[in-house]
Amino acid sequence: MSLRDLGYALQDFGRVGLVMAKRAAAGWWADERSVTPGMVSELVGRLHPERIDVRVVDIIPETHSTRTIRLAPVGEGFLPPFRAGQFVALFLDIGGVRTSRPYSISSSPTQTGFIDITVRRMTPGFVSEFLNEHIAVGDRLQISGPAGSFCYEPLVDTDDLVFLAGGCGITPFMSMIQHAADIRADITMHLIYGNRTAGDVIFKDRLEALASSLRSLRMDIVISEPEDGYQGRTGLLDTKCIRECVADLRGKTFFVCGPHAMYDVCLQALRDLGVPERRIKRELSGPLPDVTRAEGWPQEIDRGRRFTARVESHVMPARAFEVASTEPLLVALERNGLIVDSLCRSGECGVCRVLLLEGKVFMPETVALRKADALFGYIHACMAYPLSDVRIRL
């Protein structure tokens, strides 16, 4: 790794350095004797807050079904540093149901006054419809601190990057591309962006402007359902498309982000093309739209089957309610007014883990369950689907 690359990596933590510089100016870091009790905890809490109060300062229409929501800290608060590609969880109360959803940050880390999240309205879409239909400038919300590891790593990734994006999966790449432009990173980027129609392309004008101004950025837009007379590239982001767009796959790192259906196509295409697994990075994508089609789903469990979930806790009386076999336990808990901390909602972070005391659940193979959790009976509620009556402890 060159000193220049090391410099780029350190710039990702520029705001951390700014905070420390301010502390130094105040004499906090003069010597070890200046460190007072609680100082480290306070600094860590500021850099890695669990909750941040924000307000909506702008709403930017992107397409007929997508809007960017710009969030700034409330009052004297500030936003912690983040890395291009990370996400925040947005905490909401919708009709008495308290829930959360993770959204990739679509703005660049070099912009310190606000962060952008970009939301496409899904139908049906409990949270996405609310954010597109009811959120207005001035509203106050709460978000988590930045999280996630879907980031460019100069120490291990190559400097020749291919971004495979589908639909709203463009959001982390928008942050990465803008950040690379802001810091003049010495990397090459090739964005291959798939959408259903030409009208669905998010950030179209911004991406075209960046592609025309940056020698390091190449872009291919791929439309799967083109209108008559469309002159651009069409189809899916499959083996044929990737082979045509990327002439030489050697020395490249591939990033993949998009809807679930896209992963099956893209990841298989990359394997068929001989791309090493270590050169493929994929973003988390939430619960499966149809868990019964997941590898390992027991076919004897009917889609409409319902079970009883009994919930115990040290701070409340036991409760019981029905849950469908195709419904994640976390969703059922929230629907019944029970709050479980969560972050990624994709089975990786483990924030929503609960103890399974009785019964069986199905968790897709993508769930990153720690060996210790599996040994002692913990499950990730966001990606755990009941296969029998269950008893869990929060």
Image: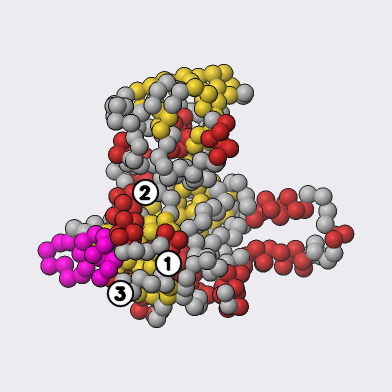
Q: Is residue 389 above or below residue 35?
A: above
| Quadrant in the picture for the C terminus | top right
Residue 340, position in %: x, y? Answer: 53, 34
Residue 289 falls in image quadrant: top left
Q: Which is more toward the observer, 46 or 258?
A: 258
Which kind of residue does numbered mark 1 sit on?
Answer: Thr
Give the residue furthest to the right.
33
Q: Is residue 380 magenta?
A: no
Which label number is shown at residue 253?
1
The first of marks 1 and 2 along the sequence is 2
Kindly identify which residue carries mark 3.
247
Does residue 162 appear to the left or right of 39 in the view shown? left
Res. 377 in view: yes
Does residue 316 appear to the left or right of 273 in the view shown? right
| Quadrant in the picture for the N terminus | bottom right
Residue 118 falls in image quadrant: bottom left
Kindly identify which residue carries mark 2.
132
Which label number is shown at residue 322?
none
Q: Do the residues under discs 2 and 3 have CB atoms within 8 angstroms?
A: no
